[in-house]
Amino acid sequence: MEEEWMRDRSLLRDLLRQHPQASPQELARMTGRSVSWVKKWRKRLTEDDLHDPSVLCSRSRAHHAPYFRWDVRVIQRIVEMRLSPPENLKRVPGPRALLYYLPRDPELQAAQVPLPRSSRTIWKILHITGCLVTRSKELPYPNELREPLEEIQMDFKDVGSVSPEQSSQGKRQHVIEVCNFVDAGTSIALLAQAREDFHESFRTGNGDHLLAPLWTSASDDL
């Protein structure tokens, strides 16, 4: 493909030597290329030496201009504010807070260096400097299949059709809840009881909060 492109560029170079006054439309008709292609390569060929064979090669599409780099003082000040919150701030400042405090810093004001204007930019700087660490995604793994009646799972679910005005205990939330007991091995519902006096809480082994009833007859029914 590059050989065909160089052949067309060489043809355009010869036509420019023979017909220097030809219009882009005429050159496009003679080369079988578009007018925009003729304009682009006529400009490149006339700017360089026509006898140099390297002008017929494609130019690199890589980024030529240097990328913008933040001043070292800005990066250092962001890290310092992250480790030592400014103006007696009682918490670790996040990207939005740092975006607020950076323009108020007297040293950066005196230096008149460009400052980030986006919290996302500060978020990137915090990651580059190690102030923020991206959590690795844990690969999901399937749970072991349980035998029938080996494990019973318990959970509560609100009954949304009951309004707080219907509560006899004056509850504003979780008026009526259903206590569900499901067999983990077969997913069969073993018991489901709806009551209004589910209002105590306890913490399970995995750290989840559940509501516990004031009565214990449900476990006896199982």
Image (cartoon, rainbow, N blue to C red):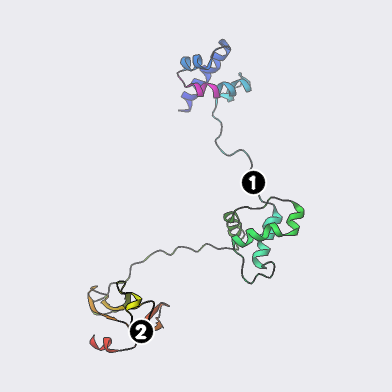
Q: Position of residue 58 (x, y in %)?
A: 54, 29
Horizontal placement of 137 versus 53: left or right?
A: left
Specify the quadrant of the image occupied by residue 88.
Answer: bottom right
Mark 1 to mark 2 CA distance (whole Å): 64 Å
Give residue 44's mark. Answer: none
Which residue lies under the disc numbered 2? 169
Q: Which part of the image, by quadrant, shows the C terminus?
A: bottom left
Sequence-first tag of 1 and 2: 1
The main secondary structure of the magenta stretch is helix
Mark 1 is on which residue type? Phe
As drawn, the residue found furthest toward the top would be 18
Mark 2 is on which residue type? Gln
Give residue 68's mark. Answer: 1
Is residue 151 a member of the stretch shown in magenta? Answer: no
Q: Which part of the image, by quadrant, shows the N terminus?
A: top left
Question: Which range of residues does the magenta coloring cover?
Answer: 32-40
Horizontal placement of 103 versus 174: left or right?
A: right
> Considering depth in this image, is 161 or 151 the residue closer to the camera?
161
Position of residue 77 relative to residue 58, above or below, is below
> Tag 2's secondary structure?
loop
> Tag 1's secondary structure?
loop
